[in-house]
Amino acid sequence: MARMLIPCALAVLLAGLVPMSAAPVPESTETVIRLQVAPMAAPRPALKYQLLPEVHELQPGQVVHNFLKSFMEQNYFFFNKEAEEKREQYLTMPLADLPLKEIRASYGTNSGLRQADYAARLETVDWQMLPILRREGINALLPEVQQLRRLAAALKVRFRLEVAEKRFDDAVRTAKTMLALSRALGEHPTLIAALVGVAIANMAIGPIEEMIEQPGSPNLYWALTSLPDPLVELRKVMQGERLLMGKLLESFEDPSPQSAEQLDRLIQELDRTFKNQVDKFDAAKYVKKKVADSGQLKAARQRLIDAGCDAKQVNAYLSEQVILADEYLTFLAERDELAKAILLPHYQMQTVLAGHREKASEEGLFLGLIPAIRKVKLIHSRLAQRLALLRVVESLRLHAAERGGFPSKLDEVRVPLPDDPVTGKPFQYRLEGGKAILQGTPAHGEEKNPVWNVRYELTLRK
């Protein structure tokens, strides 16, 4: 699962990455988001609006199964083909064109969405996945994870309805539900769930942008500032990935010499697993080729001894065990070389891994099982950058409310501003003819990707 699910998750995620805002216009390698906004001071009290449920809203209960209960007796609403096609239209059409009466009738009081609001305001997140991961390993199924993305899409339609009707308190309530769902997925001990959590958070960004553009929309600077950073945690996720591999690799934790029959069974099991999970990789053929090379065999045996393995035991290993044990140690080292930096800010991870080349699966027996950690971090950082950009956008509305216009440079803004999470430096900003232009720096290698090259162009509504 570790290798095969990551590409699937990346594909699923792309739909949540493209900004859904007031008229995003792709220009060349950029995505330009043009917003006409009104000056707006911070609400009083300043924390009147929050984007995650507050403690006073919470009550005892289990978040996960209550989110899943949203689908009960709601087959037509969530799974009917015609209903899904309409939902896709509601998600993509301009806000002004939404058939509000039609959407209100099916989304405004839907019991499944009300159940999601309830679930988001419970205090215990328990996916009950650890026993499953220990038992099933990389063959564990995660049917509930993708279903929750379907729930988020329905919530987004309701969010857009509330924005279009200028029911901002209701819109903030839905934003809380979506971001609570996103954050809960960061408590799931798999990378696929975290990526879906990031996708759901990205889905919420478009309606927030649309709300910012509405006359009378409250300023969300302090609400955005109050969000946890990162919104979707990766610590438990990465530790879960280590657990995920435990069942498959547990045989390699035993250093004692194994018989030819034991090794043959082990290689056959690896072969079956890899042919299903790692691009049909042929484990038996790989091991046989390594064993036939006396130079590689001798070097592998010496690496095991140098790594601290008992020399007497290593010298008693059959050739196949020497290769398998050496490949296992190579896998552990390579996995941790990547994983050690994933919790760092993006620019620090780039520094730590500078010059490190990720090895292809054919370069090592287990290397195909290492998740695409750099790509995961890329997507994770993309969300952090989008949220930070929104916070700066709202700071510009604060400044305009105080001073009558946009600042000529960001240093003039009187509230603290976040740095670009990708670079650790201030965002790019300029004022041209009364238009505020704000953008982040694309990650290395993504300079021509419009998903990463997001530029806000803000004008003040007269």
Image: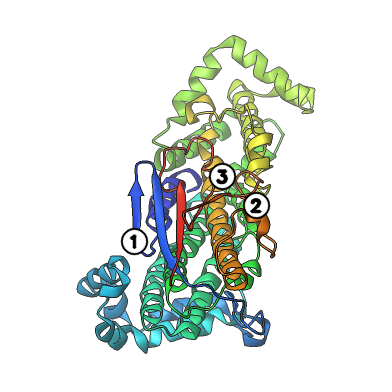
- Picture quadrant of residue 366: top right
Amino acid residing under circle 1: Ala
Disc sitting over residue 345 in the figure: none
Q: Are marks 2 and 3 in contact (CB under 8 Å)?
A: no
Asked whether, in this view, residue 185 is left or right of residue 239, the answer is left
Q: Which residue is mark 3?
A: 248
Looking at this view, is 326 or 172 the one in front?
172
Classed neighbour count for the residue bearing mark 2: other residues with Cα under 10 Å, few (<14), some (14–19), many (≥20): some
Q: Earlier in the sequence, mark 3 or mark 1?
A: 1
Give me the C-alpha separation between circle 3 and circle 1: 49 Å
Position of residue 28 relative to residue 238, above or below, is: above
Q: Which residue is mark 1?
A: 23
Q: Position of residue 108 (x, y in %)?
A: 36, 87
Q: Which residue sits furthest top? A: 295
Q: Nearer the viewer, mark 2 or mark 3?
A: 2
Can residue 346 be seen in the rendering of this structure?
Answer: yes
Q: Which residue is mark 2?
A: 419
Q: Are marks 2 and 1 in contact (CB under 8 Å)?
A: no
Does dot 2 land on a helix, a strand or a loop?
Answer: loop
Amino acid residing under circle 2: Asp
Q: Position of residue 432 (x, y in %)?
A: 48, 51
